[in-house]
Image: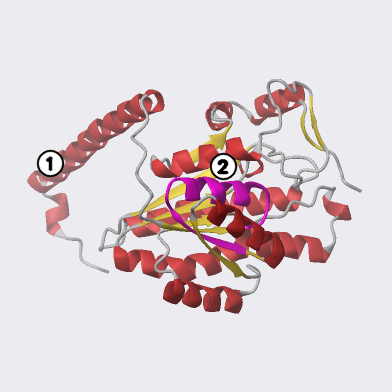
Amino acid sequence: MPQQDASSNNPAVMAYNAVLVLFDVLVFLVKAIYIVGKGVFEMAVLPPARDVSGDIVLITGAGHGMGKNLSLQYAALGTTVVCVDVNEKTNQETVTAIKSKGGKAFGYTCDVTNRQQIIETAQQIRQEVGTVTILVNNAGIMPTHPLLQQTEPEIRKTFEINVMAHFWLLQSYLPGMLEKNRGYIVAMSSVAGLCGLNNLVPYCGSKFAVRGIMEALAEELRQDARKPNIKFTTVYPYMVDTGLCKRPHMRFPNLMRLVKPEEAAAAIIDGQRRGLVDVSIPKYLLYLNTIIRVFPIKVGTLLRDFLDSGVESDL
């Protein structure tokens, strides 16, 4: 039988270990109280917005909707914008619109479901533009019908664009940020990444995945010995009026109206510039979800039924 360490039964050693644990508990409580207090303060007084005029921002899905608005608004702040989209024509229209206003923009056609294309495009961008310091993973699709009516290609494409592309883009652009010891990663989740919604099962799954990817990567880099200066912002928009959400319905349209893409883009950029970890649009939805999650699941269901907001099947 293995011999027991005599020191483990030594009263002095046991008392010393107990004091260490008690000290760790006290340190934890003091730090937790400070962090909570700071968090409450920053809810009322936001951190200052950082200057992004020296940054190179890459935005996927830049040819239309929220991606186009993000591109235009970043360019107006003096940022060099790299527009990436699978549609060459609409992407070039965004680039042209930026340049017509005196902004700096570059356009690249890339299918974000194609890992090799992403890698090759990243190499080209680094050579022709420079190191991307703000990555906005915006591209996404949203089939809206019941799960049993979703086809295999639809489900696979939803995850290829909404989830898998994040991995390939992160692997392509994160190394450059680590070299510069400076970078921002913005990922588009959704309110559908906070709660399950009817007619959006694969979409909800993909947006919950984005939330997990961002949280895990932030933790991975937090524990990195190099202590890299990389910040993460996950965005949870309500339904944005870009055409992606084809048949929305809402019981209280004044309270839960469709968000204008220019408003959503402004809130996303503001959140990134202030270094916010989570940004919901409207802002109160993130807090509402956090509060409701404290209660039994049926309370959330009750609230969902009361608000009666979602999307109809497009079939």
For label 1, the crowd category at 10 Å Cα-Cα, with few meaning under 14, some 14 to 19 and many 20 or more, is few
- What's the distance in space between the residues labelled 1 and 2, CA to CA? 57 Å
The local secondary structure at tag 2 comes to helix
Label of residue 250 in the image? none
Is any atom of residue 276 visible in this view? Answer: yes
Q: Which residue is mark 1?
A: 15
Name the residue type under label 2.
Answer: Ala
Residue 110: percent from left, percent from top: 63, 70
The question of residue 54 being in magenta is answered with: no
| Sooner in the amino-acid sequence: mark 1 or mark 2 | 1
The way the protein has been coloured in the rendering is secondary structure
Q: How many marks?
A: 2
Looking at the rendered structure, which numbered label has been put on residue 265? 2
Q: Amino acid at mark 1?
A: Ala
> In this rendering, would 28 be left or right of 44?
left
Mark 1 near mark 2, Cβ–Cβ under 8 Å? Answer: no
Position of the N terminus by quadrant: bottom left
Identify which residue is drawn at 30% across, 55% down: 229
Choose between 104 and 207: the one closer to the eye. Answer: 104
Magenta-drawn segment: 61-84
Q: Which-is-in-front pick, marks 1 and 2?
A: 2
Mark 1 element type: helix
Q: Which residue extends farthest right?
A: 315
In this picture, is 74 found above or below 292? below
Was residue 66 drawn as part of the magenta stretch in this picture?
Answer: yes
The residue at the point 59 percent across, 79 percent down is 116
